[in-house]
Image (tube, helix red, strand yellow):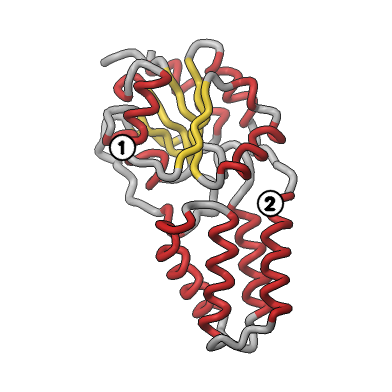
Amino acid sequence: MQNLTTIGFDADDTLWQNERFFRLTQARFADLLRDHAEPDHLMQRLLDAERRNLGHYGFGIKGFVLSMIETAIEVTEQRVPASVIAELIATGQEMLRHPIELLPQAREAVEAVARSHRVLLITKGDLLDQERKLAQSGLGDLFDGVEIVSAKTQPVYEAIFARHGDGAARAMMVGNSMRSDVVPVIEAGGWGVYVPHGLVWEIEHAEAPVDAVRFHEISQLGALPDLVDSLG
């Protein structure tokens, strides 16, 4: 087994809170459209819009807001009041200003493994928003490299770990998304470490690769240094 030299960290809901703010905004969205659609139906229509729009807007708050507006237009048969559209835009702007809340042991885990390994931040989403969150997190100086990508796939990880490290076979990715942070890295030949967050966007769901030798799950980031040490 090749030695582990490079460790990548996801950002949203791995190092800091993110999905919680989307859920709060969805609840407000449902309240605004309560006279036009039942909450469960509305959320399914919104999810459908988000799936359709990923190829146009990518991941992040801006695409989420545009998908809410599109859904509002659809469920009201183009009669949605301008005041509702304005409130949805304001809600998105508020999300973009929300202070960063680090998750427990996030800093300690990154600092611990950074003493012996090259560490990277690998996140997807809107460039400006992700840069803002990283700057506010106070973690930026801990990373040897930062990659903000439009999608997390096997080829993307292979390119990143070749550019910043010794290839995917000597790399690990740590994150809360099975679909984006774990499965594609294992497919690339690396280690995938799943850290459950509790709130997961439905689009990020995937089956755990439980038969993969390089798949690991830890309950919280504080367990990462011991896992890394055990791999040698």
- Residue 146 tag number: none
Quadrant in the picture for the N terminus = top left
Judging depth in this view, the residue of 129 and 194 nearest the camera is: 129
Give the residue drawn at x 43%, y 70%.
48
- Establish if 6 lies above or below 39: above
Quadrant in the picture for the C terminus = top left
- Establish if 152 lies above or below 68: above
Amino acid type of the residue tagged 1 in the rendering: Gln
Check disc 2 and report the residue beneath it: 96
Quadrant hosting residue 181: top left
- Marks 1 and 2: CB-CB under 8 Å? no
Give the residue drawn at x 62%, y 31%.
106
Alpha-carbon distance for marks 1 and 2? 29 Å
Mark 1 secondary-structure assignment: helix
Pinpoint residue 143: horizontal percent, then vertical percent. Answer: 57, 22
Pinpoint residue 151: horizontal percent, then vertical percent. Answer: 41, 44
Amino acid type of the residue tagged 2 in the rendering: Leu
Judging depth in this view, the residue of 229 and 29 nearest the camera is: 29
Pinpoint residue 183: horizontal percent, then vertical percent. Answer: 33, 41
Q: Using a 10 Å C-alpha cutoff, classify the residue at mark 1 as few (fewer than 14 neighbours), some (14 to 19) or many (20 or more).
A: some
Judging depth in this view, the residue of 147 and 200 nearest the camera is: 147
Quadrant hosting residue 178: top left
- Establish if 208 lies above or below 102: below
Residue 86 horizontal side relative to residue 16, left or right: right
Residue 28 horizontal side relative to residue 175, left or right: right
Check disc 1 and report the residue beneath it: 154
- Among numbered discs 1 and 2, the one appearing first in the sequence: 2
Judging depth in this view, the residue of 43 and 81 nearest the camera is: 81
Q: Using a 10 Å C-alpha cutoff, classify the residue at mark 2 as few (fewer than 14 neighbours), some (14 to 19) or many (20 or more).
A: some
Residue 206 horizontal side relative to residue 17, left or right: left
Pinpoint residue 49: horizontal percent, then vertical percent. Answer: 46, 69
